[in-house]
Image (tube, rainbow, N blue to C red):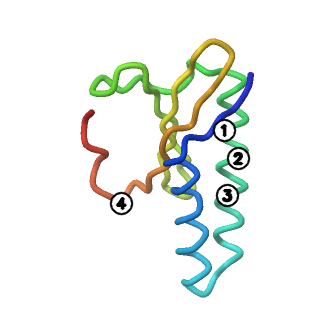
Amino acid sequence: MKIEYSQRAVSDLDQIAVYYASSGDPTAGEKIAAAIRERVAHITEAPLFGRAIVQRPGVRLILLVRYRYKIFYRVAGTTVRIIHVRHMSRRPWPPA
């Protein structure tokens, strides 16, 4: 399967890197980015594994438990589109 990242997801990943770089532990950001990429690779192997989000039709969610991130994505044909990456401590993503 092909992987695409929305502009928002790319921005989310950039913000994660900036946050950890400014926190004094830039290697943490690199570890989290690698874990996200690994989790996304798993999504391509089993795209319907993630939980469907009722409030957002067509959107699925998979957790990155170790680092407490949620990865929101859509599956369209042979493409997995990562649409948002959000830390679990943040307020819930408002419904569409």
Count neighbours of disc 3 (C-alpha within 10 A) and say few if under 14, some if 14 to 19, many if 20 or more. some
Tell me which residue sits at (62%, 26%) in the image.
Answer: 80
Which of the two labelled residues, at mark 4 and mark 2, occupies the earlier sequence position? Answer: 2
Q: CA distance from mark 1 to mark 3?
A: 11 Å
> Image quadrant for the N terminus?
top right
Q: Secondary structure at mark 1?
A: helix
Identify which amino acid the numbered label 3 is placed on: Ala
Count neighbours of disc 4 (C-alpha within 10 A) and say few if under 14, some if 14 to 19, many if 20 or more. few
Identify which amino acid the numbered label 2 is placed on: Arg
Res 23 quadrant in image? bottom right
Q: Name the spot of residue 70 as percent of width and height, x first.
A: 47, 45
Count neighbours of disc 1 (C-alpha within 10 A) and say few if under 14, some if 14 to 19, many if 20 or more. many
Res 40 quadrant in image? top right
Q: Where does label 1 land, which residue?
A: 40
Q: Where does label 4 land, which residue?
A: 89
Q: CA distance from mark 1 to mark 4?
A: 21 Å
Q: Where does label 3 land, which residue?
A: 33
Q: Name the spot of residue 89 as percent of width and height, x first.
A: 36, 60
Q: Are marks 3 and 2 in contact (CB under 8 Å)?
A: yes
Tell me which residue sits at (58%, 75%) in the image.
Answer: 20
Q: CA distance from mark 2 to mark 1?
A: 5 Å
Q: Where does label 2 land, which residue?
A: 37
